[in-house]
Amino acid sequence: MKPRIIVTRRWPAVVERILAERFDTTLNAGDIPLTPTQLKAAFLNFDAILPTVSDKLPASVFPDGDVRTKLIANFGVGFSHIDLGASRQRGIAVTNTPGVLTDCTADIAMSLLLAVARRTGEGERQLRAGEWAGWCPTHMIGTKLSGKTLGIIGMGRIGKAVAKRAHFGFDMKIVFFNRSWVEDDQICAMAANQVPTIEDVLAQSDFVSLHCPGGAENRHLIDAPRIAAMKHAGFLINTARGDVVDQDALIDALENRVIAGAGLDVFAEEPLVPERLMQLENVVLLPHLGSATEETRVAMGMKAVENLTAFFDGRPMPDKVA
Ligand code: DGY
């Protein structure tokens, strides 16, 4: 008998077809998010659950007692939405989809950086509103990237990909904070400077880009004092997770021009975006588009397929996180 699996949202069609061939697959044709009650029931009825980063799996959705589920094969690299204590307690393995979304997430970080520095969102809004009065030397003046310093917090795969783009593409200097020491050919080629504290990054950088995981350990890593420690003309870019930044403190800082601006692809309570943030011109807002390309979403789905197939064949899973 084929293992019974449930996919919580629509996945790329090509991946859904492969899943349906290999497994007894329940798809979500309507793409309506499952409720906590439906998620809880899934643990009793399916051998594997295939959630994504917008499905919340706190301890309360894991049923007490015996469950049928043996694997949570997450569609996404971030897994802070899954209570790993609760899964471990029930002997459920968890996998993610690392590596395949590095370039596209780095591209979105760079587009936010460019958009907020060069005010392209504001410019387009002005033009579409029919409010552009024509070229003049003082119109919508932004900030030049070349020669500026980019600070990276979290120099993993995505942090490095952003640094590479900024350094080689835009001639930016790179400083970074990472918990462990990072030394490899890429870091040397960029002459990227690892500094001992986050505060060092904030003080030295014209742009700060966040690339650390979400969840309890990094919750509000960037809080009001740290935002205030940035350069007054500095910009904050977040493509990591909304909870890494104290969102209210950031809004206060943007309203009061404590920093120059921000580019955000992630938010504290997605899909809610506070009205105060929407009102600000010095912030560029995207609806969590980091990995949203055809190539990357298919590759993410195929990673989940590989993890599932390995699990049910009794082989080691390539991307086991717990
Ligand atoms: C992830 O995979 O964690 C991303 O945030 C999705 O784009």
Image (cartoon, grey):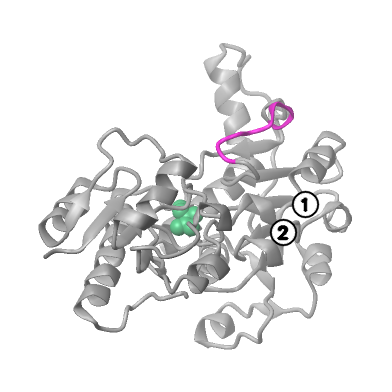
Seen from the viewer's position, the closer of residues 196 and 3 is 3
| Sequence-wise first label, 1 or 2 | 2
Quadrant of residue 167 within the rendered picture: bottom right
The stretch in magenta equals 270-277
Horizontally, is 115 left or right of 108 in the view?
right
**Residue in the image at 47% along x and 75% along y:** 322
Which mark is in front, 1 or 2?
Answer: 2
Seen from the viewer's position, the closer of residues 23 and 144 is 23
Horizontally, is 241 left or right of 199 in the view?
left
For the stretch drawn in magenta, the main secondary structure is loop
Residue 279 shows up from this direction: yes
The answer to whether residue 26 is above or below residue 95 is: above
Point out the image quarter for the N terminus: bottom left
Residue at the outermost top position: 130
Q: Residues within 10 Å of mark 2 (few under 14, many from 20)?
A: some
Residue designated by label 1 = 234
Residue designated by label 2 = 219
Quadrant of residue 268 within the rendered picture: top right
- Amino acid at pointer 1: Gly
Is label 1 in a helix, a strand or a loop?
Answer: loop
Residue 101: image location, x then y, percent: 41, 61
Seen from the viewer's position, the closer of residues 61 and 177 is 61
Q: Residues within 10 Å of mark 1 (few under 14, many from 20)?
A: many
**Residue in the image at 60% along x and 54% along y:** 241
Look at the numbered discs 1 and 2 and tell me whether their residues touch, using CB distance below 8 Å: no
- Amino acid at pointer 2: Arg
Magenta region includes residue 198: no
The answer to whether residue 21 is above or below residue 247 is: below
